[in-house]
Amino acid sequence: MKYNAFGAELDRNGYAPSILQQGERCHMCGGHYIYDWLDRHEVFGGAYREKSKELGLWVLLCHHEHHIFGREAVHNNRAKDLELKQEAQRAAMAAYGWNTEEFIAQFGRNYLEDE
């Protein structure tokens, strides 16, 4: 078994349980896999993708409408992507006891200053 630095067990793909949602529904609309399959979306991608997985900063999103192709899909809509990053920053700071500077040290910038 592997664990993250905060003691959360990682699954076989390196994911800690999400600190942003519970259950098997789209984080944005509440839909479930009967309507569209669900993708795991790491909120902070690129160089921070693995850290997002390990710290539970991921959500489930409807593949077509909210992840990849829709007008509100996080990969197509900067405003929706920023909302999700802000939510994740707040959750991480609360869950891990970080202040803004500590969050920046982990993820490179403060997404809350865009509010």
Image (spheres, rainbow, N blue to C red):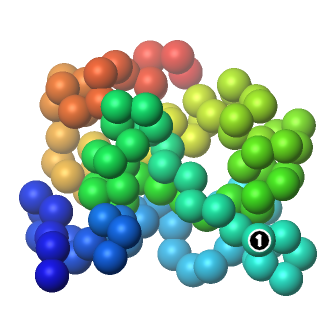
Which residue in the structure is indicated by mark 1? 37
Residue 17 appears left or right of 102: right
Q: Nearer the viewer, residue 32 or 87?
A: 32
Point out residue 26 in the picture as x, y percentages from the top left corner: 70, 66
**For residue 53, above or below residue 36:** above
Work out whether residue 60 can be spotted: yes
Residue 14, quarter of the rendered image = bottom left
Point out residue 5 in the picture as x, y percentages from the top left corner: 10, 58
Residue 90 appears left or right of 79: left
Residue 67 appears left or right of 12: right
- Element type at marker 1? loop
Residue at 20% x, 72% y is 8
**For residue 106, above or below residue 9:** above
Q: Nearer the viewer, residue 84 or 55?
A: 55
Q: Nearer the viewer, residue 71 or 111?
A: 71
Residue at 57% x, 80% y is 23
Residue 76, quarter of the rendered image = top right
Which residue is at the far front? Answer: 12
Number of numbered discs visible in the structure rendering: 1
Give neighbour class at mark 1: few <14, some 14-19, many 20+ (Cα, 10 Å). Answer: some
Q: Amino acid at mark 1?
A: Trp
Point out residue 110 in the picture as x, y percentages from the top left corner: 36, 22
**For residue 66, above or below residue 106:** below
